[in-house]
Image (cartoon, helix red, strand yellow):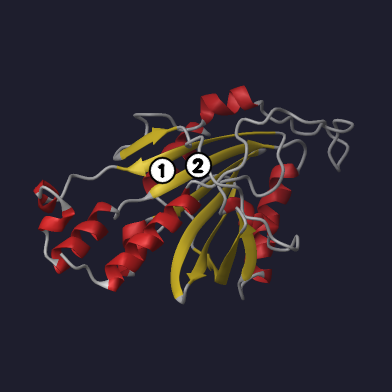
Amino acid sequence: MKRSSGVRLCATAAVSALSLALVTGCSDEGSKGSGDGKGPDGKPAAKALSAAELRDLIVAKGEVPGYDVGAVPAGRAKPITTDGATCGSLARVLSGLPPTEAAAQTDRLATETRKKDPTDNATSLDDLADGKFEDALNKSMDRDVTTVSLSSYEGDGATQALKAVSDAVKACSGGFSGEQAGTEVKFTKVAEEKPSGSGDASVAFSATSESDGETAPLHAEVVRHGNTVASYFTMNIGAMMTKKAYVVSPEVVKAQSAKLK
């Protein structure tokens, strides 16, 4: 069967996008120094949780209805880096990392589970007509994949981390460029979105990526719970290929927020 060039491009884009979906830095970092232990008002500064404590608080298998939760794969790409610090917090969140360096952190990957489409019964993709092949490919990838990162900060570090994201969403609205694993990464637009409203404060945004003239949105949300920050980065490759709207997985945010109350 001769497949259309559009399908081949979609498949190529899917593979490229999937590598980005699994981007993170080192997980489960240990605690770092905390200064003199006092906040700006002279009162005892908030103490950061340890990586072990965060592992007890992050969503686990069986805790998010409709999602399979597990470890972020070890074979992951390098984080996105930017030349300037202005958009750095956004690049970190889109890499599955905390928005700023934290005292401790851990992460999980939540993948939406869906019933197989009837076309999956075909003996191979070559048995499908061009249109059926493309539909089957899109449907098989139409599922949210969300990286959840929990990070903990000393003092007012969590507040400052959230502010860094909020400031960057405004300052980087025209987009920004970076590099990931030696490859240029370009975002043409950053836009603020309506956050879930969970936690003490939250910021949500979309970043439109561009590759070979094709654009696709990525969605993220950062939520502060006391001195702990939950960062969510969601991709849906099938939705990206068909231009279907999607958002940060609300089921994942709800389940994670419940564990942080």
Q: Is residue 12 above or below residue 222?
A: below
> Which corner quadrant of the image does residue 8 belong to?
bottom left
Q: How many marks?
A: 2
31 displayed left or right of 218: right
The answer to whether residue 45 is above or below residue 97 is: above
Circle 2 residue: 148
Reading the chain from its start, which is encountered first: label 1 or label 2? 2
Residue 252 badge: 1
Q: Amino acid at mark 1?
A: Val
What whole-number distance in Å separates the C-alpha atoms at marks 1 and 2? 8 Å
Q: Position of residue 255 (x, y in %)?
A: 41, 38
| Camera-side residue of 153 and 139 | 139
Coordinates of residue 246 in the picture (x, y in percent) = 37, 61
Question: Dot 2: what SS?
Answer: strand
Q: SS of the residue at dot 1?
A: helix
**Image-based side of 180 in relation to 242, left or right:** right
- Residue 160 position within the rendered picture, expressed as x and y whole percent measured from the top left: 73, 50
Left or right of residue 136: residue 52: right
